[in-house]
Image (cartoon, helix red, strand yellow):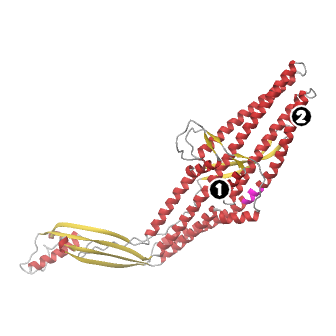
Amino acid sequence: MRTLFSSLALLIAFGTVSRPDVVWGQQPPPPPAPTTPLVLPIVGVPQAGTVMTIEATTPNVGAISGNTLNGTVQIQGVFGGSTPAGRATLEPLTLNLNEAIRRGLAYNLGVIGSTNTERGARAAERNALAKLLPDVSGTITAADEKVSLATLGLQSAQNLPPGFQFGRVLGPFHFFDAGVVASQRVIDLTALRNYRAAKDITNATAQTVLDDRDLVVLAVGGSYLQALAAAARVDSARAQVDTAQAVYTQAVRQNEAGVNAQIDVDRSQVEWQVQRLRLISFQTDFASQKLVLGRMIGLPLGQEFALATMMEYAPGARPSLPDALTTAFASRADLKAADAQVRAADQVRKAAKAQYVPSFAVNGGYFVAGETPSQSNGVFSVFATVDVPIWTGGRIPADVALADAAYNQRRAEYEDVRGRIDFEVRTAFLRLNATTEQMSVAESNRTLAQSTLRQARDRFAAGVADTIEVVQAQESVATAEQDYIDSLHALFLAKLSLARAMGNTEAGVATLLQRSKP
């Protein structure tokens, strides 16, 4: 009898005190925690930067004055930065437009940031999928214990048979178990909807990466065009300086010969100095534009480079406005991203409502347990759990309301993106039409101004005109050259803007290269 009670005490101590998580050598896993809905933010994916093109009206003051559309690309936020790669070389780097875009896509901070955001979204998708898959883990436990029976109250037990009492301690005894524990949520609509929402979010971020690549191409291409325009202004200003100097030298010689007055010399000298001031201004602007371009595409710090792609005007065909709108709505990555965000918000709304539905989970494990590994027996346990929400303190209705608000916001954002695309395509067409006509006029005006200057210089050399006519003609040439450069730059930037508006900026750059000289 004493042995019987000692064995009973061993079972009680083993099952309730020394290892409260073990029942007769079986170790069931704890039930999984209830899932919560994946709630999207009220606003969409924040834009860390912007790239846009603007056609500004630039007044020209001179002998022939007029207003021209001067295109410019505005870059804000991360798209203006990069991660510089490599070391600067002593020799200037020859940089064409293709290479500049390739470096921009590789090192621009806008693409790097959106790519890392996509990686985070894919990790969140895998995490959501993990909640639908079984959790399996292995466990090994070995114990060597001695238990005080006084802590169990056995020594003070009442109504025991006369002559029987428990010992003060039990043990030492040994315990060993090893096995596999598994848990699986068989029915959990909330987790399923969360996973579908995570997939849509991943799709949205992938489309955002494509859209950011388009923006980088637009930013780099526009900056390259601006640098080319600045270089053309420098060349034009340098030619004007040479012409003004030649006129001044001619005026000095004629004054020494007594052919003209000192005022002609002074007037031609003033014109020469004005052209020199313009050259200094244009050279500074060109150097600044190169710094902006190099910063954007991750050139090594302090790396000098020369532009190798020169643009030339050549008329070309363009799509009709209806075709451009159709292409834009089918191709724009930002519209696809907004659509994926709407689908994700809808899945989150369904996930929030699915919390009202009971969930079903199965947990179990198989072990070998005994005093030692050589004296172990196989044991198992299986548990089925049904989780029925009865009272959640208003949490589920709050989640549903929040998900509804997010869904409505995403719908509004999607419609806004469609409207913005329509606006950008129509605006790009207006600018392209205007700059095409402006280019034709500027080219003709430049030819006429150059012809006028040649005639004025011939008349001055023949002594039938003074320097006033020459200076006015030279100012007309300077203005016409500036108009031509601005018009050419605005035309190419308008073509690039239309390609961006249609959702195929890289193809637009390829078209520009077909109209260029490498």
Say if 182 sits above or below 417 in the image: below
The local crowd at label 2, few if under 14, some if 14 to 19, many if 20 or more residues have their Cα within 10 Å, is some
Residue 205 horizontal side relative to residue 286, left or right: left
Q: Which amino acid does the dot numbered 2 rest on?
A: Gln
Lateral position of residue 150 relative to residue 135, left or right: left
Quadrant including the N terminus: bottom left
* Image location (x, y in percent) of residue 284: 68, 36
In the rendered structure, does residue 357 fall within the stretch colored magenta? no
Query: What numbered label is drawn on residue 506?
Result: 1
State the mark number for residue 455: 2
Q: Position of residue 451 (x, y in %)?
A: 87, 38
Question: Label 1, label 2: how many angstroms apart (C-alpha)?
Answer: 46 Å
Span of residues in magenta: 425-430
- Residue pictured at 71% horizontal, 35% vertical: 281
> In the image, what residue occupies the spot 53% across and 60% down?
118
Q: Which SS type dominates the magenta stretch? A: helix
